[in-house]
Amino acid sequence: MDHRYRQPGVVLADHRFTVPLDHARPDGEHIELYAREVVATGKDPETLPWLLYLEGGPGFGARRFIGRQAWLERALTEYRVLLLDQRGTGRSTPLNRQTLPLRGTPGQQAAYLAHFRADSIVRDAETIRPALTGGAPWTVLGQSFGGFCTTHYLSTAPEGLTAALITGGLPSLTATADEVYEAAYPRMERKNRAHYARYPMDVERARRIAAHLAQGPAELPGGHRLTVEAFQSLGILLGTGDGSHQLHHLLEDAFVPTSSGPALSDAFLEALQGLLSFAAHPLYALLHEPIYAQDPAAPTAWAAERVRAGHPGFDAAKTLAGDEPLLFTGETIHPWHFTTDPALAPLRETAERVAARTGWEPLYDPVRLAANEVPVAAAVYHDDLYVDTAHSLHTAASIRGLRTWVTDEFEHDGVRAGGPRVLDRLLALVRDDA
């Protein structure tokens, strides 16, 4: 433990751990993990059970809460919470364009990245658990990709779990990356139609911006090239509770008059920089498709890009040649991300190697999950943009004893927006109180 310090209503402690890069080679290279412990002020941490939080992503460190925000308010009434920066994120041996070249060639970098999926994250959790709990199992709360990790946990190390809570993160146990995106594009289209039904004035605004960019990309602060495709990727906002409203406010302030005619405003470009840059989470782009890879013989091979070709409604050039609304994308990674974003451009060849990589191992054990004995509850959001609802419900039926709460009250970020209420509902489900 490094430090113990306070914020309003909580006592925090920093923890650092050393774990093998490759858990199959415990005597080989090691990396460092960071986690932040949170305990309610006035509570004795030694009397509390542990709750491990696994953030969504891939590629995002655990959220930096201030005090008892969001679901922490409920969790801290009975748990000692550990906010883990998953390997490669936050303060846990972070990976980005600055650090990855230390690994050597793009091929060597791609091989290194293969150790940063859910299987390694769960092995990390099991490595550090005995030091924190004295060997006792803990409760895990997994949000989005954190739920994917939790499902892997149930498949490989259920003895480490008292209970598993999953929010917006029940993955298909068998779907390929291609199948994931075949299900995703129709969902994206539905979210677009719903946005334009709410804000019909945005149809013309989005088309106007796209037509302007079709004449030539704009440059965002920091050198990011705003192409039509990059603009379309703002659709990732449509999967959050207030994302449609955020997108609307962005579009209404896009242009300003200049001596050379209408131009995209500095304020608009500045706002897009913060939304489109992968500087803070490059692993999201590098490992987004491998989180679905389970066939050792099959590369992901830019699945989202290949599948998009079969959904011409997302082709901006065809849209602008007609009179249809521009369709935004989201939750997809494409080769062009590694040419438009300065945070990713130096990693383009590495990304190609990752996309071509084979040898990915299965992440879930359907047989073991069918015999599960760990209490599990999952919040499944109706028409979730990021995780297919039908896939989630099929998986829910495949895990023995799993109880679901299917709701349209929240979008994918419900555990943040709904906070204590979402967590309280899941805890009631695992305790048979609901």
Image: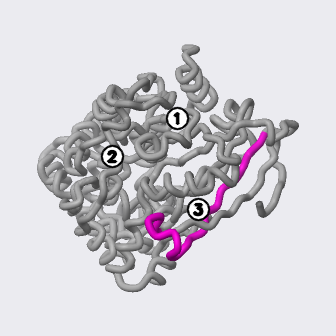
Q: Amino acid at mark 1?
A: Ala
Element type at marker 3?
loop
Element type at marker 2?
helix
Image coords of residue 273 (percent x, y): 47, 62
Q: Earlier in the sequence, mark 1 or mark 3?
A: 3
The answer to whether any part of residue 81 appears in the image is yes
Image coords of residue 274 (percent x, y): 50, 59
Count of residue discs? 3
37 is within the stretch colored magenta:
yes
Q: Is residue 161 left or right of residue 134?
A: left
Q: Nearer the viewer, mark 1 or mark 3?
A: 1
Residue lying farthest to the top in this orientation: 434
Q: CA distance from mark 1 to mark 3?
A: 24 Å
Vertical side of 324 occupied by 345: above or below: below
Q: Which residue is mark 2?
A: 205
Q: Nearer the viewer, mark 1 or mark 2?
A: 1
Looking at the rendering, the stretch of residues picked out in magenta corresponds to 22-39
104 is within the stretch colored magenta:
no
- Name the image colouring: one colour
Q: Which residue is mark 1?
A: 164
Q: Quadrant of the N terminus?
A: bottom right
Pick the front one: 416 or 211: 416
Would you call the spot at circle 1 few (<14 residues within 10 Å), some (14-19), or many (20 or more)? many
Determine the residue positioned at 74% across, 30% down.
77
Determine the residue positioned at 21% across, 56% down.
303
Determine the residue positioned at 37% across, 27% down.
382
Pick the front one: 113 or 283: 113
Quarter where residue 91 is shown: bottom right
